[in-house]
Amino acid sequence: MMIKLASLPLVLAAAAWATCCANCAKAQDLPNGDAVRGKQLYMRDGCTHCHGTVGQGGGGRTGGLRLAQMPIPFAAFLNQLRHPANEMPPYVAAVLSDQDAGDIYVFIASLPQPPDVKTIPALND
Ligand code: HEC
C-alpha cells in the first residue's frame, strides 16, 4: 500500500499510539493494588529482613534477592510467596491474602532503578 505524504503524520501518530499501548498493556498486567498499603505490608511482614527496605536485597542468612526492578510477572510472584523456591519462608493465604500480595507487588513495581555505579563517587576512586 502506498502512503500519501499528507497522511504521514497520521501514520506516525498511529505508530506512537501503538507503542504507547504496548506499555499501557504492561501496566494493566499489574494487579489492582495499592502501593501505599503494599509498602506497609512489605515493612510489616518481614520482607525487609531479607530483601531490604527498598528491595535492594542482601539481607537474611542467604541474602534475599534484590526485588527492585524484578522482572517476574504477578503469577510468578504469587507462586514464590505461596511455594518459595528455596530458602524463603512460605506466606500462606491465611497470613497474606492475594490482595495483600497484589498491593506488595504494586509497591515493588513502583521502586526506582538503582543509581548508575558511575554516579557514585566512592565506587569510582
Ligand atoms: C528469611 C528471608 C526472606 C524473607 C523474610 C522473605 N524473602 Fe523473598 N526471598 C528470599 C530468598 C533467599 C529468595 C531466593 C529464592 C528462595 O530462596 O526461595 C527470595 C525470593 C523472592 C522472590 C523471587 C525474586 C525473583 O526475582 O525471582 C520474591 C518475589 C520475593 N522473595 C518476595 C518476598 C516478599 C514479598 C516477602 C515478604 C512478604 C519476602 N520475599 C520475604 C528470602 C526471603
Image (cartoon, rainbow, N blue to C red):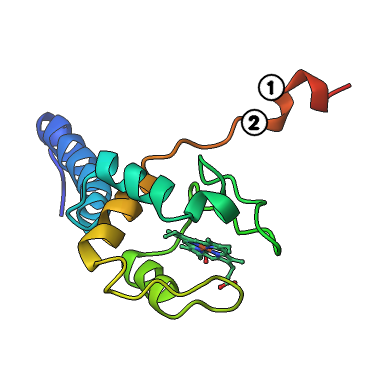
Taking the spot 59% from the left edge, 78% from the top edge, the residue there is: 86
- Pinpoint residue 80: horizontal percent, then vertical percent: 44, 73
Q: Give the amino acid type for the residue marked by disc 2 in the picture.
A: Asp
> Who's the residue at 30% across and 49% down the image?
106
Question: Does residue 11 sit above or below 100 in this rendering?
Answer: above
Task: Say which quarter of the image contains residue 35.
Answer: top left
Task: Inspect this view and state whether residue 67 appears.
Answer: yes
Instruction: Compare residues 94 and 28 and report the one nearer the observer.
Output: 94
Q: Above or below — where is 13 with respect to 73?
A: above
Residue 30 location (% of width, % of height) = 25, 55
In this view, the residue in front, 41 or 78, is: 41
Q: Can residue 66 be seen at all in this image of the molecule?
A: no
Q: Residue at x 51, y 41 (%)?
A: 53
Residue underneath mark 2: 116
Label 2 residue SS: loop
Q: Badge 2 local density, few (<14 within 10 Å), some, or many (20+)?
A: few
Q: Number of numbered discs present? A: 2
Label 1 sits on residue:
119
- Which percent across, then down, holds residue 47? 48, 55
Along the line of sight, the residue nearer the viewer: 29 or 17: 29
Rendered view: 69 above or below 90: above
Is residue 120 left or right of 41 when viewed as pictured?
A: right
Q: Is residue 115 above or below residue 72?
A: above
For label 2, being within 8 Å of ligand 1 is answered no
For the residue marked with disc 1, what is the amino acid? Thr
Determine the CA span between mark 2 and mark 1. Answer: 6 Å
**Do callouts 2 and 1 mark residues in contact (Cβ within 8 Å)?**
yes
Instruction: Write the residue at 31% across / 68% down.
Output: 95
Asked which secondary structure carries label 1, the reply is helix
Residue 79, how many percent across, how many down? 38, 76
Looking at the figure, which quarter contains the N terminus?
Answer: bottom left
